[in-house]
Amino acid sequence: MSLHSVEAIGEIANLYLLDAQMLGLAHYGGLYIWKTPRPVIIETGFSHTVEKTLAALEELEIRPEEIAYILPTHVHMDHAGGAGFLAKTCPHAKIVVHERGAPHLIDPSRLVESVKRAVGPMFPYYGELTPIPPDRIMAVKGGERLELGEGYELEIINAPGHAPHQYCLYERRSKALFSADAVGIYRREATGFTMTTPPPRFHYERSLETLQKLRAFELSWLCFTHYGVEAEPYRLLDEYEKLLGEWVEAVERAKRELGDDQAVKEHFVRQELKELGAYYPERMLRPEVEMNVQGVLLYLQRERGQT
C-alpha cells in the first residue's frame, strides 16, 4: 500500500514511513506515523515537511487531535524542525524531547544560529523553528515508556554520541528500533552507510557505548530516519561501528599529516565526491562532509587535546 509518498511498512503493523525528501533528495530523510490506538509521529522533518505530514494523517484517517505524542529523537532541525508547527496543529500531543534538548525547542534562537554556522549555504533547506510552550513539552532522560494501546509500548533509550540530546526508541512487540542518527545514515540504493559526526558535541566513545546499549535489545528491525526499515539489525550495528572507527581514525590521520583544518575538510570533500558524487549533488555533499569532519576535529581537540 502506498499513499502518495507514505509507505506502509508491511512487516510492522500500522507503521507508515513518510519520505520528507530532505535536502531535495528522495529516500534521504523521513518520519514515521504509527497508527496505534494512541497514534504517534516519530521525527518531524523540517518545517516545510509539515503540510505533507498533515496530508498523510488525513489519508491515514488520523485526526490531528488524536495524536498522543510527537517524538523528535533529538533537536537537530532535520529531526525536530517541524515540532513546533505540528504542536500547534495537534493540540493534545505531548512533544517528547530529551531533557538536554528541551530548552532549545522552547527557545530555538541559539539552535538556529548553531545550525546556520554548521551547514552554511545549505541552511535555506533547513526551514524554520517555532517555539513550543513549556507545558507541551515532555522532557525525558531515558528509561521512560509510552503506552500506545493494544500492547504497543515505546521505550526511550538515552543515546548520546551523535549528540548529547539524542534518544532512540524501542518497541518490544515488533522488536523495532528507531535509531535516530545513532547508527548513521543508511541508503541501500546508494553506498550503504555514511557517517553523521556533526559539531559541536559529537563524541566517539559515547557513540560506541550507545551502539553497545542498542545491541542488548532483542531486535528484528532497524528503522532509520535516514532512511527506511532494514532487517539484519545486528549486522548493521556492527558494520556502522567499524566504519565509524575508520572514519575517526582517517580524520585524525589527515589532521596529523595536513595540519590545517580547511585542508583536512577539502581532502575529504574530494574523496567523498569521488565515492558518493553519483548519489548526492555537490551543493549538498560539500557542506555535509565539511560539517562531519568539523565534528570529529572538535572531538579530537576537546577529548584528546589535539590542536
Image (cartoon, rainbow, N blue to C red):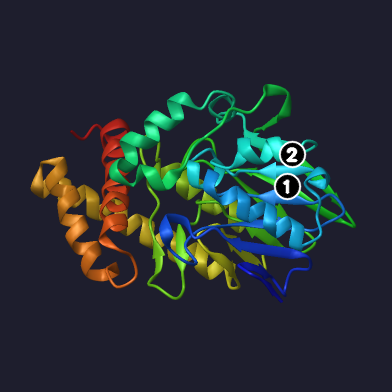
Name the residue beneath numbered marker 1: 155
Question: Looking at the rendered structure, which numbered label has been put on residue 144?
Answer: 2
Check the picture and name the quadrant holding the N terminus.
Answer: bottom right
Asked whether residue 294 appears in the rendered view, the answer is yes
Q: How far across and down, in percent of the image, does residue 290 sit?
A: 26, 48
What is the distance, in whole Å, between disc 1 and disc 2 at their CAs? 6 Å
> Which kind of residue does numbered mark 2 sit on?
Glu
Lateral position of residue 176 relative to residue 147, left or right: left
Q: Is residue 218 visible?
A: no
Could you tell me residue 33's position as x and y percent?
Answer: 70, 57
Residue at position x 69%, y 50% from top? 41
- Quadrant showing the C terminus: top left
Note whether 137 is above or below 61 in the view shown.
Answer: above
Q: Quadrant of residue 9?
A: bottom right
Q: Position of residue 84 (x, y in %)?
A: 62, 35
N-terminal of the pair, mark 1 or mark 2, is 2
In the image shown, does 6 or 270 lie closer to the viewer?
6
Q: Residue at x 23, y 55 (%)?
A: 250
Q: Quick one: label 2, few (<14), some, or many (20+) residues within 10 Å?
A: few
Mark 2, secondary structure of its residue? loop
